Image: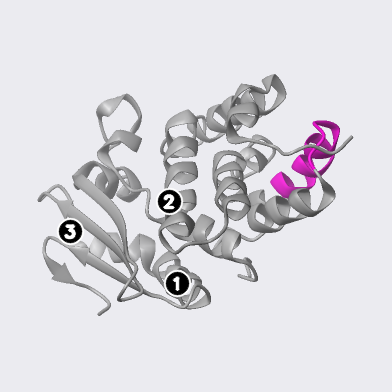
Amino acid sequence: MPQTMTLDRIRTDPNLRTLIDAANQHLAAQGFTDHGERHAGFVSRFASEILRCLDYDARDVELAAIAGYVHDIGNSISRVNHGVSGACMLFPLLLQMGMPMADVLAVVTAVGNHDEDIGVITSPITAALVIADKADASRSRVRNGTPEPGDIHDRVNFAIERNRLSVDKPRRVIYHRIEMDATSSIMEYLTIYMQRLAMCERAARFLACTFELNINGRSING
């Protein structure tokens, strides 16, 4: 019988935990930054917080938390189209766990559309997931605590000492504030994140907000 699904139940499901670990290992072997429990937790927390701050109902907040936690499991198969792969994998798993069909569809739609290459934002949950996912750049994502020589992704992430995502509800602004050291530069950050930044702006507009990126005290897209 369908039942209300919670993030706590998702986090303790052995199949989903195995998929998150497998996705992280698959990407580690290819030299990607962390996509494991740390990244899943960050995205889950901030996706739900965005909707909570904007007064969305408790169901949407919880589904955003769930989508954020499981959004990258498709990487266990391939980095290419991993959002769509993950959505297809999640559909039967969530149904088997007893999640109502409407909630399953809300989660898989968000997961299937979070990638900047092919994603389309058609729901608040998708919008919140996109912003939380693209905002996770941090020194703590660099594996083994040391950037690989010549790897711009490692260099940019390693340079980021502080990363804050917040919502100004009265002004309808979602702020992403970053503090970087001289290990990298704003130009290198934008080399990687320009397409993702554009997707965050689209996601914020869907939520009737604007998205403002601020690096080292300077507004980048304001």
Say which of marks 2 and 3 sits in front.
2
- The residue to which callout 2 is attached is 49
Q: Residue at x 25, y 30 (%)?
A: 146
- Distance CA(mark 2)–CA(mark 3): 29 Å
User: Of the residues shown, which amino acid type is indicated by label 2?
Assistant: Glu
Q: The disc labelled 1 sits on which kind of residue?
A: Ala
Q: Earlier in the sequence, mark 2 or mark 3?
A: 2
**Spatial CA span between label 1 and label 3:** 25 Å
Q: Quarter of the image holding residue 98?
A: top right
SS label for mark 3:
loop
Given residues 87 and 50, the one toward you in this image is: 50
Residue that label 3 marks: 185
Q: Pointers 1 and 2 in contact (CB under 8 A)? A: no
Q: Give the labeled residue for mark 1.
A: 204
Q: Looking at the picture, does residue 25 appear above or below residue 74?
A: above
Asked whether residue 98 is drawn in magenta, I would say yes
Count of marks placed on residues: 3
Task: Please determine whether, in this image, residue 137 is positioned above or below residue 197.
Answer: above
Q: Which of 71 and 207 is in front in this view?
A: 207
Image x and y of residue 213, in percent? 27, 67
Q: Which residue is drawn at 31% across and 42% down?
A: 154
Q: What element carries label 2?
A: helix
Highlighted magenta segment, given as a residue range? 85-99
